Amino acid sequence: MIYEIISQSYSSNSYVITGDRTILIDPGLPGDPTLATYIARSEREIDVIINTHCHYDHIGGNWNTEIYVHEDDADAVETGDMKTAYSHFTSSFEGFPVARRLKEGDVVDIGDHELTVVHTPGHTSGSICLLDTATRTLFSGDTWFMNGIGRTDLPSGSFKSMEMSFKKLRGIEAEHICPGHGPSFENNIETIFRSFFEVI
Ligand SMILES: [Zn+2]
């Protein structure tokens, strides 16, 4: 099962995927009430947190369970450095230990679901999307939103990398897109691609 916890604030959305293990994609800001309410009601413990990238509005709510993050953003999550952009939200941040440094093509197998890591740099160098092939759902982090693409002006961001990432995403067999902020939506990649990357 996939549970979408859509944030009502600056905090990122969170997604809970249940199988043999329970995965949480991006807890958001610390103490986000929407996620806290879900966890309080749920009977399942979270076994693994996957962060789509290192920004504080996605990782600030991490806790000391197993944390997976792409290898290019893992140091920032561990040290809580400026790449996490924590200073937009709080005065200090110490980071969290990372249990697994993800790479392109890695698979996180949780029984009913297999999540495949798609490395999509651009918003940050270690940004990832996660593809659940069984349900054709893509968790797109801050790479792909209903009406746009992620910012590329923050540390390690790159518009050129973002364009390459969207070229890669054009070939992904996903129907349902679950972004880091805002509502989920049906795959609209050609519209997004034309709007942001194709200069006539
Ligand atoms: Zn971000």
Image (cartoon, rainbow, N blue to C red):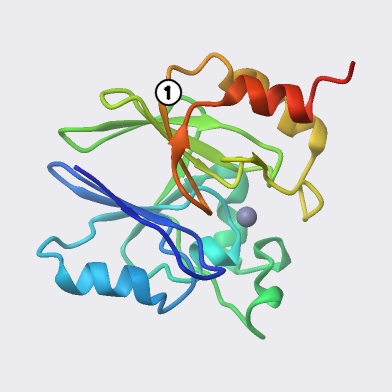
**Vertical relation: 51 (above or below) 57:** above
Q: Amino acid at mark 1?
A: Ala
According to the image, label 1 marks what residue?
174
Query: Is 188 above or below relative to 33?
Result: above
- At x 51% / y 28%, what residue is drawn? 104
Q: Nearer the viewer, residue 120 or 188?
A: 188
Residue for point 47% across, 65% down:
28
Residue at screen point 66% across, 37% down: 121
Foreground residue among 124 and 94: 124
Give the image quadrant in which the ligand numbered 1 is located.
bottom right
Q: Residue at x 49, y 71 (%)?
A: 29
Q: Is residue 179 above or below residue 103?
A: below
Camera-side residue of 184 and 106: 184
Q: Position of residue 192 (x, y in %)?
A: 67, 29
- Count of residue discs: 1
Quadrant hosting residue 76: bottom right
Label 1, secondary structure: give it: loop
134 on left or right of 45 = right
